[in-house]
Amino acid sequence: MSRRSAVSLLRLGTRAAGLRSGTPPRPVHLPARCASSEPEAAFKPERVAVVTKTTRYEFEQQRYLYAGLSEEDFKQLLAMKGSSYSGLLERHSIHTGNVEHIVSSLRREGIQVRVVKRGEYDEEVVRWADTIISAGGDGTMLLVASKVLNPDKPVVGVNTDPERSEGHLCLPVHYTHAFPEALQKLCRGEFRWLWRQRIRVHFEGTGIKPTSVDLHEQQLSLEQHSRAHRTTDSRRGTGTLHDGFSKTSLLPVRSLNEIFIGESLSSRASYYEMSVDDGPWEKQKSSGLSICTGTGSKAWSYNINKLAEQAVEEVLLIGKSQTGLEIPINRDLIEKVTDEYNESLEFRPDDRRLFYSVREPIVNRVFSSSRQRGFASRVSVRSRCWDACMVVDGGTSFEFNDGAIATISMSEEDQLRTVVLQP
């Protein structure tokens, strides 16, 4: 999944009701946890929450029709932007049809189902369900996973528009149209559990608040982004001067892919201090800091650090001229070196290590960068930024300004239970 420049900190969600129950949720009877992917006994959930994405058609409709525009005006505005009304409606219909297929398949098995739009998805929904299905793409899966704090609650992703979405975190595309087959395999135990490690963040200081902004829903401009954070701040009655935290607090979400820290305005360098594995603090000025999991190592982090064949060829040619060695620099060698380096950036979803990447570091007599990237068990960051955010999995933004300190790590209890089904 390719990611974008630091300005997209404001738009990281562009890819992107409370439920009440009078009785406590009944547990799904699941076997003991393991450290990696392994076969497990069958299980059948009793209550499933199906969390659906907001389609582009729905987003555009809310954006324009809410302003009092007619359907015809809506079509004309889309045409002016080079977007097809019929095309958006078609993709919306495909998504909703696949959601209905999932829901009807579950109900035929006698499973209680609640369908929840991503904007209505909250902790109460999580408590009600004993299994959660993400109906959308990877962005929806990341949002769903972020609020599931119980390691024994499975999360299953179904790609509801596979022609337009890659869906690396979802079941194989085959099951989008054959979901009953997936259910039968679960009931027969023909699957594997995959425990995906996740990131937790402890924070303290005066420049961070636990109140988040959903970038997927907001589609924010810079001004709107700042206003949203100010609005959530004023609702808490804190005014413009943020209250400090007398003790370390745990952020109420977990990250399946990555944490990104940086200034909201891409033209402004991000200034912060960083300590790796409780080592010395190092002043940094860069385009931001990314810290990912094994799951996230194939996503934005991969695209931040990967090498292009053109760069590899140029380096090999320089090496050849400097050493005088007769290295046969041909297309085959360039491809092999490029692939081997890029593959080294990926690691397993159940790996307990973090991988940090300092994006485009500025190095001079004031700011240093002993290592631009590397593995760690623990990374601490002290913000010296003016208008920065900590963004969880590209969709949830937390203010992270001067005085804020974040300690980023992993814990055994934060693993996410997902299923692996063969096509």
Image (cartoon, rainbow, N blue to C red):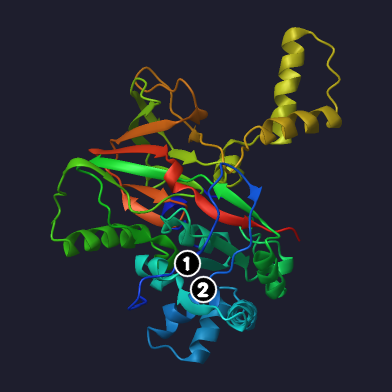
Q: In the rendered image, is residue 158 in sight?
A: yes
> Percent from the top left, x then y, of residue 102?
61, 77
Q: Nearer the viewer, residue 142 or 323?
A: 142
Give the residue type that dot 2 points to: Glu
> Percent from the top left, x then y, of residue 306?
63, 36
Give the residue type that dot 1 points to: Asp
Whether label 1 touches label 2, CB < 8 Å: yes
Is 382 rendered above or below residue 140? above
Is 187 rendered above or below residue 346? below
> Percent from the top left, x then y, of residue 46?
51, 73
Is 63 rendered above or below residue 377? below
Picture disc at residue 311: none
Residue under pointer 2: 46
In the picture, which quadrant includes the C terminus?
bottom right
Q: In the rendered image, is residue 13 in sight?
A: no
Is 267 rendered above or below residue 134? above
Picture disc at residue 130: 1
> Percent from the top left, x then y, of residue 322?
72, 10
> Callout 2: 10 Å neighbours few (<14), some, many (20+)?
some
> Callout 1: 10 Å neighbours few (<14), some, many (20+)?
many
Q: Residue at x 48, y 47 (%)?
A: 415
Q: Residue at x 57, y 56 (%)?
A: 418
Task: Give me the C-alpha separation between circle 1 and circle 2.
Answer: 7 Å
Q: Is residue 397 left or right of residue 422?
A: left
Q: Is residue 238 left or right of residue 148?
A: left
Secondary structure under badge 1?
loop
Secondary structure under badge 2?
loop
How many numbered circles are shown? 2
Q: Name the residue furthest top.
A: 324
Quarter assignment of residue 324: top right
Q: Is residue 387 left or right of residue 298?
A: left
